[in-house]
Amino acid sequence: MSQPWLQHYPPDVPPTIEVPDIALPALLTRAAHEFPGVAAIRFYGQTISYAELDALANRCALALGALGISSGERVILLLPNVPQAVICYYGALRAGATVVLANPIFEAGALIRQIEDAKASAVIALSMFHPLVAQVRARTNLRHVIYTNLKEYLPATQRQLFTLLRQEREGHLVPDEEAQRSQWLARMLEAMPQAGPLPDPEPHALAALLYTGGTTGESRGVMHTHRSLVANAIQTSTWLAGARRGKERVLCAIPFSHAYGMTACMNVAIHLASTMILLPTFEIQNVLHSIKRERPTLFPGVPPMYAAIANQPNARSYGLSSLHACISGAAPLPVEVQEGFERVTRARLVEGYGLTEAGPVTHANPLTGGGRAGYIGLPLPSTEAKIVDMQSGADLPAGGIGELLVRGPQIMQGYWQRQEDTAEAITPDGWLRTGDVARMNTDGFFQVIERKKEMIVAGPYNIYPRDVEEALYEHPKILEAAVAGIPAEEGTDLRAFVVLRQGESATPEEILAFLRARLSAYKIPGAVEFLDALPRSFIGKVLRRVLVEGRKGGDA
């Protein structure tokens, strides 16, 4: 198979990687052995070294074993980006368990469905989520509920202030009845030694269940083995040409509960023995203060994060010069956002691509230059990619528009207890059907045009929302934009949803006139609707289905 992308690889990036025959926790063991004194975690000024993180993960593994959690059991983590998330992720894996990463802002029904589907036996949750956990435990067969408090890894002064001013007001106190029938992580860790007999997970054992599909349909559990997650951590680290083991500082603003945050922030950081700068939520002033104080060098993120920094009037005053590599994923990166962020920070921002079923990273633009704006870039080392005809499945030549297929060691084992879905997603020879409409140019750079499910058919034309959105982002008054097809009595009506910059005003006629000067007539929306904000998933992906729900063609 021809791989034209290899000629555009940075000089220090090899075409393939060797995937070691190890389980994921071995990455932490190695980092702690080689860099015991390096800060593994920075959390509001508190430091946890790699030696300390390794010992805490061991204690967690032993504590879970003492509860009777055996190899292969599923453990739900309901945690934002706090030190306990890293400790419990690697601790559960060392105990031989399978980690299930849950969205901390779930509503009860969604979490119950996930727990029941995974047949999870335990949940580890931040104490502020106790109302959700109490609802869930009453309606499921959870054997163990383990709570942990946000204050436990804060510096001493901040811990005191948190206890006095925030703990009760923000709902971090668990009611007595709920607390008494639950376990507490801090006590469990304190009761355990730093070392003891632990299972030795097999590389091909199930490491994580990552639920996906919530933005477009029914959620399904994606099965990743230790080997597939180790592979993707190494592939992504290898792409960060010039990254120095034990020296980098990663700004972890993407939730670890999402595949992108799990790999690009946590697992990559631990493979590189880097410092993880943890942010439980993305609040622009908090982020800028963290950049100024902690001086991160790597910043994996999503487009809304980069747009927020680029649009902050005084962003440069926070000293953004430490940033040198930023990879955007999880959603398309508008060219205007990329250019604005690079202009403000002088850091290199490139678009990448992935999906939960692929660990998730499969493509990225070179960080050393030569990338293509509007493209997802090149396949990572040991990753194959091709475009096939959406009807026949035949391979298409460069320039052809069809479905993107990928293959490599980072591909999932399949969907949990869904053999038919797995057979539909993965071909007999190992190609993963991504469901994305894309094309590859003659140089081997790939461009995602749209999700197959979100492509809009209007008469004889196929309309790709991103084409219209890129034009909208060129308008100087527009901060964010999305395009969706609204069902109408006759076919589908194209509608633009626009968020204006603060202090700006515009009319639908003004926006449509702007688009007519840039797009073919069949791509012009039939209406423009102004919103205060676009509906997004917790990772920042625009939820077009929410824009469509409750609207009919012609209605605002």
Image (cartoon, rainbow, N blue to C red):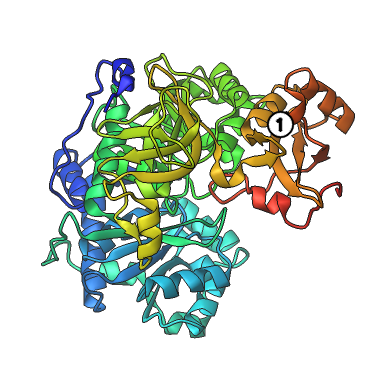
Q: Quadrant of the N terminus?
A: top left
What residue do we see at 78% from left, 34% from top?
525
**Looking at the image, how many numbered discs can be counted on the residues?**
1
Residue 440 location (% of width, % of height): 44, 25
Please indicate whether residue 130 sits to the left or right of residue 520 in the image: left
Is residue 469 placed above or below 48 in the rendered structure?
A: above
Identify residue type, mark 1. Answer: Leu
Front position in the image: 326 or 129: 326
Front position in the image: 331 or 122: 331
Please indicate whether residue 440 sits to the left or right of residue 37 in the image: right
* Residue with the most extreme left position: 197
Residue 490 location (% of width, % of height): 80, 48
Please indicate whether residue 84 sits to the left or right of residue 492 in the image: left
Q: Residues within 10 Å of mark 1 (few under 14, many from 20)?
A: many
Residue 466 location (% of width, % of height): 62, 32
Answer with the quarter of the image where residue 88 lies. bottom left
Residue 6 visible at all? yes
Is residue 80 placed above or below 379 in the rendered structure?
A: below
What residue do we see at 56% from left, 60% from top?
105
Label 1, on which residue?
Answer: 479
Mark 1 residue element = strand
Residue 191 visible at all? no
* Residue with the most extreme front position: 392
Residue 221 location (% of width, % of height): 40, 61
Is residue 219 placed above or below 66 in the rendered structure?
A: above
Answer with the quarter of the image where residue 214 lies. bottom right
What residue do we see at 35% from left, 64% from top?
419
